[in-house]
Amino acid sequence: MVPPVNLLAVATAVPPHKLEQRAVAEAARQVYGRTFARFPKLAEVFVNAGIERRYSARPLEWLTAPHDLAERTDAYVESASELFVTTARAALERAGLSARDVDVVVTVSSTGIATPSLEARVGPEMGFRPSIMRVPVFGRGCAGGVSGLTLGARLARAEPGEVVLVVVVELCTLTSRTDRGTKSDVISSALFGDGAAAAVLRAGPEAAPLRIGAAAEHTWPRTLDIMGWVIDPIGFRVMLSRSLPRFVEQRMAGPMRRFIKSAGLHAPQLVCHPGGAKVLDAIEVALELQKGTLRDEREILRNYGNMSAPTVLFVLERALRRGLRGSALLSALGPGFSANFLALEAAHG
Protein backbone atom coordinates (compact mmCIF):
# COMPACT_ATOMS: atom_id res chain seq x y z
CA MET A 1 0.00 0.00 0.00
CA VAL A 2 1.37 3.43 -0.97
CA PRO A 3 1.91 5.61 2.11
CA PRO A 4 0.30 9.06 2.24
CA VAL A 5 2.13 12.15 1.04
CA ASN A 6 2.81 14.53 3.91
CA LEU A 7 3.37 18.25 3.68
CA LEU A 8 6.12 18.58 6.28
CA ALA A 9 6.53 22.35 6.12
CA VAL A 10 5.73 25.48 4.13
CA ALA A 11 7.53 28.84 4.17
CA THR A 12 7.08 32.14 2.36
CA ALA A 13 9.15 35.26 1.68
CA VAL A 14 8.96 38.59 -0.13
CA PRO A 15 11.68 40.86 -1.57
CA PRO A 16 12.81 43.98 0.31
CA HIS A 17 11.08 46.85 -1.47
CA LYS A 18 7.63 47.73 -0.10
CA LEU A 19 5.17 49.35 -2.52
CA GLU A 20 2.37 51.24 -0.83
CA GLN A 21 -0.68 51.32 -3.07
CA ARG A 22 -1.06 55.09 -2.86
CA ALA A 23 2.51 55.62 -4.08
CA VAL A 24 2.02 53.15 -6.92
CA ALA A 25 -1.21 54.90 -7.96
CA GLU A 26 0.55 58.26 -8.12
CA ALA A 27 3.44 56.82 -10.13
CA ALA A 28 0.99 55.12 -12.50
CA ARG A 29 -0.79 58.42 -13.13
CA GLN A 30 2.52 59.94 -14.18
CA VAL A 31 3.60 57.02 -16.35
CA TYR A 32 0.19 56.29 -17.91
CA GLY A 33 -1.19 59.82 -18.01
CA ARG A 34 -2.60 59.52 -21.51
CA THR A 35 -4.31 56.25 -20.70
CA PHE A 36 -5.92 57.73 -17.58
CA ALA A 37 -7.10 60.68 -19.67
CA ARG A 38 -8.85 58.33 -22.10
CA PHE A 39 -10.19 56.03 -19.38
CA PRO A 40 -10.58 58.12 -16.18
CA LYS A 41 -12.35 55.28 -14.34
CA LEU A 42 -9.09 53.31 -14.45
CA ALA A 43 -7.97 55.29 -11.40
CA GLU A 44 -10.61 53.41 -9.40
CA VAL A 45 -8.79 50.10 -9.83
CA PHE A 46 -6.14 51.16 -7.33
CA VAL A 47 -8.83 51.78 -4.72
CA ASN A 48 -11.06 48.83 -5.54
CA ALA A 49 -8.31 46.22 -5.88
CA GLY A 50 -8.42 45.46 -2.16
CA ILE A 51 -4.66 45.99 -1.88
CA GLU A 52 -2.84 48.27 0.53
CA ARG A 53 0.75 47.24 -0.13
CA ARG A 54 2.92 44.88 -2.14
CA TYR A 55 6.59 43.96 -2.35
CA SER A 56 8.98 44.22 -5.26
CA ALA A 57 12.42 42.98 -6.24
CA ARG A 58 13.28 46.51 -7.37
CA PRO A 59 12.28 49.96 -6.03
CA LEU A 60 9.41 51.89 -7.56
CA GLU A 61 11.82 54.21 -9.40
CA TRP A 62 13.27 51.21 -11.26
CA LEU A 63 9.84 49.91 -12.21
CA THR A 64 8.77 53.23 -13.76
CA ALA A 65 11.90 53.51 -15.93
CA PRO A 66 12.39 51.78 -19.30
CA HIS A 67 14.22 48.44 -19.35
CA ASP A 68 14.84 45.88 -22.07
CA LEU A 69 14.49 42.12 -21.80
CA ALA A 70 18.16 41.62 -20.89
CA GLU A 71 17.95 44.05 -17.94
CA ARG A 72 14.71 42.49 -16.74
CA THR A 73 16.23 39.01 -16.99
CA ASP A 74 19.29 40.02 -14.98
CA ALA A 75 17.07 41.44 -12.25
CA TYR A 76 14.89 38.31 -12.32
CA VAL A 77 17.79 35.86 -12.00
CA GLU A 78 19.36 37.81 -9.14
CA SER A 79 16.24 38.33 -7.05
CA ALA A 80 14.55 35.02 -7.83
CA SER A 81 17.71 33.18 -6.76
CA GLU A 82 17.78 35.07 -3.46
CA LEU A 83 14.12 34.31 -2.75
CA PHE A 84 14.62 30.67 -3.70
CA VAL A 85 17.38 30.28 -1.12
CA THR A 86 15.44 32.15 1.59
CA THR A 87 12.23 30.15 1.28
CA ALA A 88 13.89 26.78 0.66
CA ARG A 89 16.12 27.10 3.71
CA ALA A 90 13.22 28.20 5.90
CA ALA A 91 10.97 25.34 4.80
CA LEU A 92 13.71 22.73 5.23
CA GLU A 93 14.57 24.07 8.68
CA ARG A 94 10.92 23.87 9.75
CA ALA A 95 10.84 20.28 8.49
CA GLY A 96 13.99 19.43 10.45
CA LEU A 97 15.92 18.67 7.26
CA SER A 98 18.92 20.02 5.37
CA ALA A 99 19.51 20.67 1.68
CA ARG A 100 21.53 17.44 1.43
CA ASP A 101 18.41 15.51 2.42
CA VAL A 102 16.54 16.71 -0.69
CA ASP A 103 16.12 14.12 -3.44
CA VAL A 104 13.91 16.08 -5.85
CA VAL A 105 13.48 19.82 -6.33
CA VAL A 106 10.57 21.26 -8.33
CA THR A 107 11.02 24.92 -9.31
CA VAL A 108 7.92 26.78 -10.51
CA SER A 109 8.27 30.23 -12.10
CA SER A 110 6.67 32.01 -15.05
CA THR A 111 7.77 35.65 -14.71
CA GLY A 112 11.31 35.24 -16.00
CA ILE A 113 13.49 32.92 -18.03
CA ALA A 114 16.63 31.33 -16.60
CA THR A 115 18.64 28.59 -18.27
CA PRO A 116 20.34 27.05 -16.33
CA SER A 117 17.25 27.13 -14.14
CA LEU A 118 17.13 28.60 -10.65
CA GLU A 119 17.73 25.42 -8.65
CA ALA A 120 20.91 24.74 -10.66
CA ARG A 121 22.18 28.27 -10.07
CA VAL A 122 21.67 28.13 -6.30
CA GLY A 123 22.54 24.46 -5.87
CA PRO A 124 26.08 25.01 -4.52
CA GLU A 125 24.91 27.77 -2.16
CA MET A 126 22.05 25.62 -0.91
CA GLY A 127 24.22 22.51 -0.56
CA PHE A 128 22.13 20.22 -2.76
CA ARG A 129 23.69 16.87 -3.63
CA PRO A 130 24.99 16.55 -7.21
CA SER A 131 22.59 13.61 -7.70
CA ILE A 132 19.46 15.67 -6.99
CA MET A 133 16.63 15.42 -9.53
CA ARG A 134 15.76 18.86 -10.94
CA VAL A 135 12.29 19.63 -12.33
CA PRO A 136 11.89 23.25 -13.52
CA VAL A 137 8.33 24.21 -14.53
CA PHE A 138 7.41 27.27 -16.63
CA GLY A 139 4.13 28.63 -17.98
CA ARG A 140 1.60 27.79 -15.27
CA GLY A 141 1.14 31.40 -14.15
CA CYS A 142 -1.18 31.92 -11.19
CA ALA A 143 -2.03 28.20 -11.10
CA GLY A 144 1.60 27.29 -10.50
CA GLY A 145 1.35 27.06 -6.72
CA VAL A 146 -1.31 24.34 -6.81
CA SER A 147 0.01 22.56 -9.91
CA GLY A 148 3.57 22.62 -8.54
CA LEU A 149 2.47 21.15 -5.22
CA THR A 150 0.45 18.52 -7.10
CA LEU A 151 3.46 17.56 -9.21
CA GLY A 152 5.66 17.42 -6.11
CA ALA A 153 3.15 15.15 -4.38
CA ARG A 154 3.05 12.77 -7.35
CA LEU A 155 6.85 12.57 -7.41
CA ALA A 156 6.91 11.92 -3.65
CA ARG A 157 4.24 9.24 -3.99
CA ALA A 158 6.27 7.52 -6.72
CA GLU A 159 9.30 7.19 -4.44
CA PRO A 160 8.19 6.81 -0.80
CA GLY A 161 10.73 8.15 1.66
CA GLU A 162 12.33 10.61 -0.75
CA VAL A 163 12.26 14.30 0.14
CA VAL A 164 10.68 16.56 -2.47
CA LEU A 165 11.22 20.31 -2.25
CA VAL A 166 8.81 22.54 -4.18
CA VAL A 167 9.87 26.17 -4.65
CA VAL A 168 7.55 28.70 -6.29
CA VAL A 169 9.00 32.12 -7.20
CA GLU A 170 7.32 34.93 -9.12
CA LEU A 171 8.56 38.47 -9.72
CA CYS A 172 5.54 39.98 -11.42
CA THR A 173 6.62 43.60 -10.96
CA LEU A 174 9.67 43.09 -13.20
CA THR A 175 7.27 42.62 -16.11
CA SER A 176 5.80 46.12 -15.71
CA ARG A 177 5.75 48.01 -19.01
CA THR A 178 5.99 51.78 -19.39
CA ASP A 179 6.20 51.75 -23.20
CA ARG A 180 2.58 50.82 -24.00
CA GLY A 181 0.06 52.27 -21.58
CA THR A 182 -2.79 49.87 -22.28
CA LYS A 183 -5.62 49.12 -19.87
CA SER A 184 -3.98 45.79 -19.04
CA ASP A 185 -0.73 47.56 -18.12
CA VAL A 186 -2.54 49.91 -15.74
CA ILE A 187 -4.53 47.09 -14.13
CA SER A 188 -1.38 45.01 -13.74
CA SER A 189 0.37 47.90 -12.01
CA ALA A 190 -2.47 47.95 -9.47
CA LEU A 191 -2.60 44.20 -8.80
CA PHE A 192 0.69 42.38 -8.97
CA GLY A 193 3.50 41.93 -6.47
CA ASP A 194 6.49 39.66 -5.93
CA GLY A 195 6.93 36.72 -3.60
CA ALA A 196 8.07 33.13 -3.13
CA ALA A 197 7.02 30.02 -1.24
CA ALA A 198 8.54 26.61 -0.58
CA ALA A 199 7.05 23.34 0.58
CA VAL A 200 8.66 20.08 1.75
CA LEU A 201 6.94 16.80 0.91
CA ARG A 202 7.59 13.16 1.73
CA ALA A 203 5.49 10.00 1.44
CA GLY A 204 5.52 8.03 4.67
CA PRO A 205 3.72 7.27 7.93
CA GLU A 206 5.17 10.23 9.86
CA ALA A 207 3.05 12.93 11.49
CA ALA A 208 2.76 16.19 9.56
CA PRO A 209 0.55 19.30 9.51
CA LEU A 210 -1.15 18.18 6.31
CA ARG A 211 -1.61 15.15 4.14
CA ILE A 212 -2.06 15.60 0.40
CA GLY A 213 -4.84 13.74 -1.30
CA ALA A 214 -6.49 13.73 -4.69
CA ALA A 215 -5.78 16.30 -7.39
CA ALA A 216 -7.46 17.39 -10.60
CA GLU A 217 -7.15 19.93 -13.37
CA HIS A 218 -9.76 21.35 -15.71
CA THR A 219 -8.90 23.31 -18.87
CA TRP A 220 -11.71 25.09 -20.70
CA PRO A 221 -11.49 24.87 -24.50
CA ARG A 222 -10.93 28.00 -26.60
CA THR A 223 -9.94 30.21 -23.68
CA LEU A 224 -6.28 30.92 -24.49
CA ASP A 225 -6.92 34.67 -24.66
CA ILE A 226 -8.10 35.03 -21.03
CA MET A 227 -4.66 35.11 -19.42
CA GLY A 228 -1.02 34.78 -20.41
CA TRP A 229 2.09 36.45 -21.79
CA VAL A 230 3.08 37.89 -25.13
CA ILE A 231 6.88 38.19 -25.41
CA ASP A 232 8.61 40.91 -27.41
CA PRO A 233 12.11 42.50 -27.38
CA ILE A 234 11.21 44.62 -24.35
CA GLY A 235 9.99 41.69 -22.27
CA PHE A 236 6.72 40.06 -21.23
CA ARG A 237 3.42 41.77 -22.05
CA VAL A 238 0.51 40.75 -19.88
CA MET A 239 -2.61 39.34 -21.51
CA LEU A 240 -5.51 39.73 -19.10
CA SER A 241 -9.13 39.62 -20.21
CA ARG A 242 -11.71 41.86 -18.57
CA SER A 243 -14.11 38.91 -18.83
CA LEU A 244 -12.20 36.90 -16.20
CA PRO A 245 -14.45 37.62 -13.16
CA ARG A 246 -17.63 36.88 -15.11
CA PHE A 247 -16.08 33.70 -16.53
CA VAL A 248 -15.20 32.52 -13.02
CA GLU A 249 -18.67 33.36 -11.76
CA GLN A 250 -20.33 31.37 -14.54
CA ARG A 251 -17.94 28.47 -15.12
CA MET A 252 -15.93 27.58 -12.02
CA ALA A 253 -18.57 25.93 -9.84
CA GLY A 254 -19.07 22.85 -12.02
CA PRO A 255 -15.48 21.56 -12.11
CA MET A 256 -14.90 22.38 -8.44
CA ARG A 257 -18.04 20.63 -7.23
CA ARG A 258 -17.26 17.57 -9.36
CA PHE A 259 -13.82 17.40 -7.80
CA ILE A 260 -15.15 17.76 -4.25
CA LYS A 261 -17.53 14.86 -4.91
CA SER A 262 -14.94 12.62 -6.60
CA ALA A 263 -12.36 13.30 -3.86
CA GLY A 264 -14.88 12.45 -1.15
CA LEU A 265 -14.47 15.78 0.61
CA HIS A 266 -17.12 16.89 3.09
CA ALA A 267 -17.53 20.65 3.52
CA PRO A 268 -13.82 21.37 2.93
CA GLN A 269 -12.33 24.70 3.89
CA LEU A 270 -11.48 26.58 0.72
CA VAL A 271 -7.94 27.89 0.22
CA CYS A 272 -8.05 29.85 -3.02
CA HIS A 273 -5.61 31.87 -5.05
CA PRO A 274 -6.69 35.52 -4.57
CA GLY A 275 -6.30 36.80 -8.11
CA GLY A 276 -8.02 40.05 -7.23
CA ALA A 277 -10.98 41.43 -5.30
CA LYS A 278 -13.37 40.94 -8.21
CA VAL A 279 -12.19 37.36 -8.73
CA LEU A 280 -12.74 36.55 -5.05
CA ASP A 281 -16.24 38.04 -5.28
CA ALA A 282 -16.86 35.90 -8.36
CA ILE A 283 -15.70 32.71 -6.61
CA GLU A 284 -18.05 33.38 -3.71
CA VAL A 285 -20.95 33.97 -6.10
CA ALA A 286 -20.12 30.87 -8.14
CA LEU A 287 -20.01 28.65 -5.05
CA GLU A 288 -22.99 30.35 -3.37
CA LEU A 289 -20.87 31.46 -0.42
CA GLN A 290 -21.66 34.39 1.80
CA LYS A 291 -19.81 37.51 0.66
CA GLY A 292 -16.59 37.87 2.63
CA THR A 293 -16.21 34.14 3.31
CA LEU A 294 -12.71 34.04 1.82
CA ARG A 295 -11.15 36.06 4.64
CA ASP A 296 -7.62 34.66 4.54
CA GLU A 297 -7.49 35.27 0.80
CA ARG A 298 -8.53 38.90 1.19
CA GLU A 299 -6.00 39.44 3.98
CA ILE A 300 -3.15 38.11 1.85
CA LEU A 301 -4.32 40.16 -1.13
CA ARG A 302 -4.48 43.29 1.05
CA ASN A 303 -0.93 42.93 2.34
CA TYR A 304 0.88 41.33 -0.60
CA GLY A 305 -1.18 41.81 -3.75
CA ASN A 306 -1.43 39.09 -6.39
CA MET A 307 2.01 37.45 -6.48
CA SER A 308 0.83 34.92 -9.06
CA ALA A 309 1.76 31.29 -8.27
CA PRO A 310 3.02 31.54 -4.66
CA THR A 311 0.04 33.55 -3.42
CA VAL A 312 -2.14 30.53 -2.65
CA LEU A 313 0.67 29.10 -0.51
CA PHE A 314 0.73 32.36 1.47
CA VAL A 315 -2.99 31.77 2.09
CA LEU A 316 -2.32 28.16 3.09
CA GLU A 317 0.43 29.21 5.51
CA ARG A 318 -1.92 31.74 7.09
CA ALA A 319 -4.68 29.13 7.39
CA LEU A 320 -2.27 26.71 9.08
CA ARG A 321 -1.21 29.35 11.57
CA ARG A 322 -4.87 30.00 12.37
CA GLY A 323 -5.36 26.31 13.14
CA LEU A 324 -6.65 24.72 9.93
CA ARG A 325 -8.62 21.59 10.79
CA GLY A 326 -10.22 18.82 8.81
CA SER A 327 -10.29 18.74 5.03
CA ALA A 328 -9.34 21.62 2.77
CA LEU A 329 -9.43 22.32 -0.93
CA LEU A 330 -6.55 24.19 -2.50
CA SER A 331 -7.49 25.85 -5.80
CA ALA A 332 -6.07 28.27 -8.34
CA LEU A 333 -6.84 29.50 -11.82
CA GLY A 334 -4.21 30.07 -14.50
CA PRO A 335 -3.37 30.33 -18.19
CA GLY A 336 -4.91 27.72 -20.40
CA PHE A 337 -7.49 28.79 -19.17
CA SER A 338 -7.49 26.22 -16.39
CA ALA A 339 -8.36 25.42 -12.79
CA ASN A 340 -6.23 23.28 -10.50
CA PHE A 341 -7.59 21.53 -7.41
CA LEU A 342 -5.78 19.70 -4.61
CA ALA A 343 -7.33 17.96 -1.58
CA LEU A 344 -5.66 18.39 1.81
CA GLU A 345 -6.36 16.84 5.20
CA ALA A 346 -5.11 18.36 8.45
CA ALA A 347 -3.37 15.69 10.53
CA HIS A 348 -5.38 16.53 13.65
CA GLY A 349 -8.66 17.32 11.93
Image (spheres, rainbow, N blue to C red):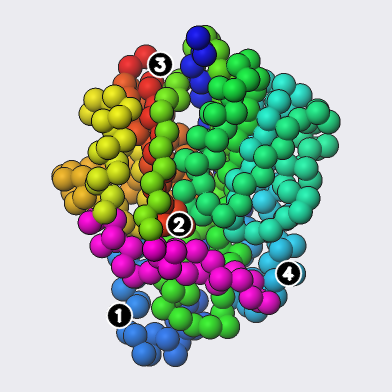
Identify the mark nearer the N-term, 3 or 2. Answer: 2
The amino acid pointed to by label 4 is Glu
Q: Secondary structure at mark 2?
A: loop
CA distance for labels 4 and 2:
28 Å
Foreground pick, 191 / 135:
135
With 108 as the anchor, is 187 left or right in this view? left
Front: mark 3 or 2: 2
Find disc 1 in the rendering and name its residue: 41
Foreground pick, 286 / 194:
286
The residue at 45%/25% (across/down) is 212
**Marking on residue 336:** 2
The residue furthest front is: 221
Front: mark 4 or 2: 2
The question of residue 262 being in magenta is answered with no
- Is the C-beta separation of discs 4 and 3 under 8 Å? no
> Badge 2: how crowded within 10 Å, few (<14), some, or many (20+)?
many
> Badge 4: how crowded within 10 Å, few (<14), some, or many (20+)?
few
Q: Position of residue 179 (x, y in %)?
A: 58, 83
What stretch of residues is rendered in magenta? 222-250
Q: Position of residue 231 (x, y in %)?
A: 61, 71
